[in-house]
Image (tube, grey):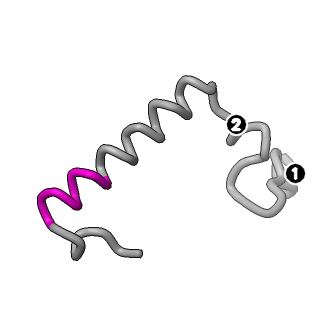
């Protein structure tokens, strides 16, 4: 057994190709983020959103 890493990673946890998602998955994620932000503003007011 060698002491070298089996899959060396460069500058981050994942390679750039591993971070790419299906466009539908990106859209669903973005809609979720928008809905979450809107709910925070409605229920917590402006103090619920940190800018």
Residue 17 picture quarter: top right
Q: Earlier in the sequence, mark 1 or mark 2?
A: 1
* Residue at figure coordinates x 16%, y 57% from the top left: 42
Q: Is residue 43 above or below residue 28?
A: below
Q: Is residue 22 above or below residue 45?
A: above
* Residue at figure coordinates x 39%, y 47% from the top left: 33
Q: Which residue is mark 2?
A: 20
Separation of marks 1 and 2 at Cα, in angstroms: 31 Å
Q: Is residue 38 magenta?
A: yes
- Count the marks: how many? 2
Residue 37: x and y in percent read 31, 55
| Secondary structure of residue under mark 1 | loop
Segment colored magenta: 37-44
Number of the label disc, if any, that sits on residue 15: none
Q: Which residue is mark 1?
A: 2
Q: Choose between 19 and 7: the one closer to the eye.
A: 19
Residue 29: x and y in percent read 46, 37
């Amino acid at each position: 057994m060698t002491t070298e890493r089996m899959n060396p990673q460069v500058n981050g946890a994942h390679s750039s190709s591993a971070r790419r998602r299906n466009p539908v998955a990106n859209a669903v994620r973005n809609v979720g983020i928008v809905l979450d932000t809107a709910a925070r503003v409605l229920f917590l007011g402006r103090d619920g959103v940190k800018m």
